[in-house]
Amino acid sequence: MRRPRLMAAVAGLALAMTTTVTALADAPDRQTGPVRVTLKPLSGVVVTPNRYWYIRGEFRFTVKATDVGTEDDQNLFVFVSIPDEIRMTTFSGNRWRCESVVGGLDCSNPDLVVPGESWPALTITTRGTGYVQDTLDVYAIANGDDWAHVGVPFVYDTSS
């Protein structure tokens, strides 16, 4: 008799998680400045129909920033915010400098780009433990203009 109650509880948890993640996935990104940021999952990420990332171990993703303004931009600064349960293990990309800080990773690239061009892609590898449901947020700014923001809801689960 316990099995139907357990299955109902699991179904209820899955519905609650899907509802929460769907709400996160539909949140608008704030990209008002001359820089636009995109995130692309690489290895270790399953993207669900609700557009959230499901991760069960080490994963990699790229951050791409493009100058969409009318003037040349340089000195791109990027902050990748990620929960404490997950840590950045490596980064790569032409002329990128990164350092781990409380709450994430600070990165910079000195390249000068003209409107329509992108800075070199920044690839980040991460690993964590346990379970966390949150948002991977990336903020970018160049030349002291307005901050751009993009976020991706995710579930990270190494608990089983």
Image (cartoon, rainbow, N blue to C red):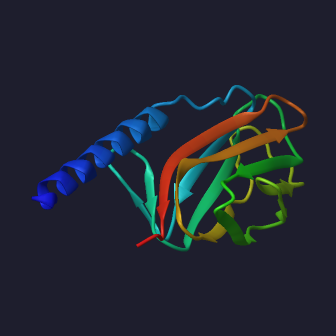
The residue sitting at 63% across, 69% down in the picture is 126
Residue nearer the viewer, 24 or 51: 24
Total numbered labels? 0
* Apparent side of residue 7 relative to residue 101 in the rendered image (left or right): left
Task: Report x, y in % for residue 129.
Answer: 57, 70
Residue nearer the viewer, 92 or 58: 58
Task: Report x, y in % for residue 154.
Answer: 49, 52
Q: Is residue 35 above or below residue 61?
A: above
Q: Quadrant of the N terminus?
A: bottom left
Q: Is residue 157 above or below residue 112?
A: below
The residue sitting at 17% across, 52% down in the picture is 5
Q: Is residue 92 above or below residue 25?
A: below
The residue sitting at 67% across, 54% down in the picture is 82
| Residue 110 location, quadrant | bottom right
* Apparent side of residue 142 relative to residue 120 in the rendered image (left or right): right
| Residue 139 location, quadrant | top right
Q: Is residue 124 above or below residue 112?
A: below
Q: Quadrant of the C terminus?
A: bottom left
Task: Report x, y in % for residue 123.
Answer: 66, 65
Residue nearer the viewer, 133 or 98: 133
Direction front: furthest residue: 1
* Apparent side of residue 139 relative to residue 128 in the rendered image (left or right): right
Task: Report x, y in % for residue 18.
Answer: 35, 43
Direction left: furthest residue: 1
The residue sitting at 58% across, 62% down in the picture is 61
